[in-house]
Amino acid sequence: MASRLRRPNLASAFWHVRDALVTALSKDHGVHPYAKWGGAFWRLLSLADLGVRPEHAGAVMAAEQTLDWVASPTRLAVIHKRRIAGRVRRCASQEGRTLQACIDVGLRADPRLDVLAESLVETQWPDGGWNCDRKPHVTHSSFNETWGPILGLARYGEVDAASRGAEFLLEHQVAYSHRTGEPAHPTILRLRYPAYWHYDLLAGLRTVAASAGMGDARLEKPLDALEERQHADGTWHVEGKWWKAPGSKGSNVEVVDWGRDANEFLTEQAEGVLRAAGRQ
């Protein structure tokens, strides 16, 4: 286990950076809610991660646009018909993260969240997760499509379904193959911020912390791995990114520049996990 390091308190300038990011993310960029990364869905996730106050105007606007798309009865009906070899194949991260973020920004009373929660529970796979893979022989859930629904259902209070999902992650020690004990993917231990829909070591630990808690012995290995990635100054650093800076050409262009501040947000999340595990 790595020794714990302390870091200085946040400078006041950092909070101004956070406010500037919130302002930029609160604007309607006039694209489909799922357009990467300027759509309302992605901006809602980031605003929730940044801890905006309940019913923040920008977050509510992003949530309404997202729910108009995600919770559409027509859309959900099509998804539920996508049953192949006895399993509904869906990008459940969309409904799961919407559920989580909407509750985080204060919209728990919206009846569309009940619809999303019921849909996720109804289509949960036997191993506790979800998967969008349409190949009939695929019967193992996907990390990428499972962590969002767990977060959403845990926030919603659907304890049984969230616990089943968390058990799927715990059976894999969060980030490792249940067959070989090696990392489940070559990049799964690399930390990034924002994570968007991508699963990694920290996303998995945060998901377990929010659902099953941190008392399971199977968390020792991934927690050690997280501590080992801490730098000498007491922070964690992003190890690659899923986004391009505003104004870039091509896909995956952000509406804000996370820049070096991403390390601070990543560090907040890592510290939160270790506190929950009693390691800090």
Image (spheres, grey):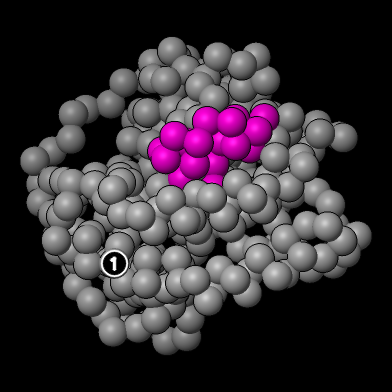
Callout 1 environment at 10 Å: few (<14), some (14 to 19), or many (20+)? some
The image quadrant of residue 247 is bottom left
Instruction: Give coordinates of residue 40: x percent, y percent.
Output: 33, 70
**Main SS category, magenta section:** helix
Residue drawn at (22%, 61%), measured in percent from left and top?
A: 60
Q: Indicate whether 79 appears above or below 55.
A: below
Start-end of magenta stretch: 149-167
* Residue 160 shows up from this direction: yes
| Label 1 residue SS | helix
Residue nearer the viewer, 107 or 203: 107
Task: Work out which quarter of the rendered image holds the C terminus and state it.
Answer: top left
**For this view, does 195 lie left or right of residue 85?**
left
Q: Indicate whether 139 appears above or below 27.
A: above
**For this view, does 152 lie left or right of residue 109?**
right
Residue drawn at (46%, 45%), measured in percent from left and top?
A: 152
Residue drawn at (70%, 70%), measured in percent from left and top?
A: 81
Q: Which residue is mark 1?
A: 64
* Identity, as a three-letter code, of the amino acid under mark 1: Glu
Verify whether residue 205 appears in magenta: no
Verify whether residue 161 appears in magenta: yes
Residue nearer the viewer, 77 or 214: 77
**For this view, does 262 lie left or right of residue 227?**
left
* Residue 186 shows up from this direction: no
Residue drawn at (70%, 56%), measured in percent from left and top?
A: 131
Residue nearer the viewer, 86 or 90: 86
